[in-house]
Image (tube, helix red, strand yellow):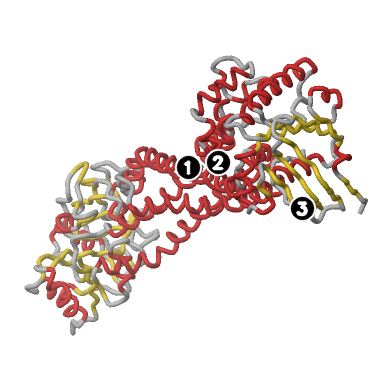
Amino acid sequence: MDTVLEISEVAFRWPGRSAFSLTVPNFAVSKGETVLLLGESGSGKSTLLSLICGTILPDQGKVDISGVDITTLNGGARDRFRGEQIGVIFQQFNLLPFGSVADNILLPLRFAPARRKRAGHMEHGAETLCTALGLPDGVTRSKASMLSVGQQQRVAVARALIGQPPLIIADEPTSALDANSQSAFLDLLFKQTTTHNTSLLMVSHDPRLGERFDRVIRLEDIAQIERSAA
Amino acid sequence: MIVRLAIASLFARALTVGMTVLAIALSVALFLGVEKVRTGAKASFADTISGTDLIVGARSGAVQLLLYSVFRIGNATNNVTWESYLDIAARSDVDWIVPISLGDSHRQFRVMGTTEAFFEHYKYRQGRSLAVTDGAIMSDLFDTVIGADVAATLGYQVGDPIIVAHGIASFTEHKDQPFRVSGILEKTGTPVDRTVIVSMEAIEAIHVDWQSGAQVPGQSTPVDVIREMDLTPKAVTAALVGVESPLQTFSLQRAINEYDEEPLLAILPGVALQELWGIVGIAETALLAVSVMVVVTALIGMMATIFSSLNERRREMAIFRAMGARPLTILGMLIFEAMVMAAVGALLGLGFLYVGLIIAQPILDSAFGLWLPIGAPTLREVYVMIGVVAAGVIVSFVPALRAYKMSVSDGMMVKS
């Protein structure tokens, strides 16, 4: 099985801040695999996600995404690579409120030419995804700020999926939703990742979500975090 | 798409962005307005006297001669004798000559003795002649023609009697010889508006009983006796001269300056006006500096607006970053935003200027004689607007660099 993400021997220390360091000896996600990463807030999840997305660089070690070690890329190339390879879903406030739904869904394609090519007809692709995610017809022309929180999260999924990036990273995407919507949201998300054979790495503090995933991992099992009061 | 989103983002903050744009627009309108008034004032100033080739007076300084003969500011140190005046008038290269006699006043306005030729030869604003709006040019010895400001300030109408005072700001009046307003001149925007014009003979007439600047006690010649007297002037304060051919201007000037019988001075009005504007021009520069400061203030205001928006837009920047935008893209977006605000402000300012001009043009012309032409933006104004946009872009680098740093350190995770 191909690996989409592989982290090896990564060590990171926030520069200048009170001593916080994170080391990850090895962690990998295979193609099409869904992984739930459990960790309390403030446990270093954000740091790990930033390392995977390449907005911060480890002091040592390798972060391979689709076989490319992103630590060898320069800043601009790393940003573009993220746009090409990773779909990101935040906890909330995923969308640019002043843009239309279509603007928001198509935004990553603006920075990722290869992904744009894969997406084909962009507006059509956005509409298809919206329909598949149970969003009302014609929603792509609505202003993002007009949507409910649940709808906004689904638009964020559409945005993460468009152009079929191999990896989707979701950072507590359900925490802003109530229990019923959470379940419906995850159903839709999984249906789409299965259809597109996309890998999903979801971070959460809620172990109850675990049964849906191929694999559940605790952050402390893959990473050593040191925090010494300075 | 990014451009569209950046503009959508501006619209989403319509109120603060609108205020910022308004501030820039007003400052640009002020700046361009000051420029217009400045060039208009300079042109009006240079147009105070035209068509006159030389001004002749007793020897003093060029600016001083210009000031008292044209602007009625200050006094002549000496007069030109009537003989010298006739000598100059008799020269073959002199086309026309108009004598001016100053020294008396009516209320706060100067009285100027001259001949009818003054109305024919005095030109302002590129060759416009004086015109009488009401009444007629003086025909009687004790007739007077008054400027528009004199009539407006003192409420005079044709036929009203006026009494001329001796000297300036004086309490001794030429009570024995009251004048009658025979005509009121059209507003010109020149010192003529503030002048009471009488004939040269009238100046002699009111001084019949005076010697060495004081009235001879007890002596009062009746008006009908004065009318019979020889009222040929003994001296003139200055004279306006027109030459036969412009080529002779300099030779005539030299001849007058080297006149043996009496120390005289002949000046070219245009040159002296330039010299005088050089002195007055300091105020003009100060005005310009102030309006530049206003533009700078507006741009700093814009900088502050962008700065204060940065925190609430951290989330927006994080989304862009997560989608693959480089920090440089964020920087570019903010600079683009500033450019749009400055450009819209500058154009709106130009619009304000035209609206202001259309409203103010007739008012300024009638109240101050200041004529501001309305036309297509001059190259200079276009440069000013480009300059404002460029300055806006430069100023916006400060918040944009901060946003750049924020988006580097935040990445896609905003710690809220």
Furthest residue toward bottom: B260
The residue at 41%/48% (across/down) is: B33
Residue B277, placed above or below residue B156: below
Label 3 sits on a secondary structure element that is: strand
Residue pointed to by mark 1? B345
Residue pointed to by mark 2? B20
Label 1 environment density (alpha carbons within 10 Å; few <14, some 14–19, many ≥20): many
Marks 3/2: CA–CA distance:
48 Å
Of pointers 1 and 2, the one earlier in the residue sequence = 2
Contact between marks 1 and 2 (CB within 8 A): the answer is yes
Label 1 sits on a secondary structure element that is: helix
Contact between marks 3 and 1 (CB within 8 A): the answer is no
Label 3 environment density (alpha carbons within 10 Å; few <14, some 14–19, many ≥20): some
Q: Is residue B254 left or right of residue A181?
A: left
Viewer-proximal residue among B58 and B20: B20
Residue pointed to by mark 3? A61
Quarter containing the C terminus of chain B:
top right
Viewer-proximal residue among B118 and A67: A67
Q: Are marks 1 and 2 on the same chain?
A: yes
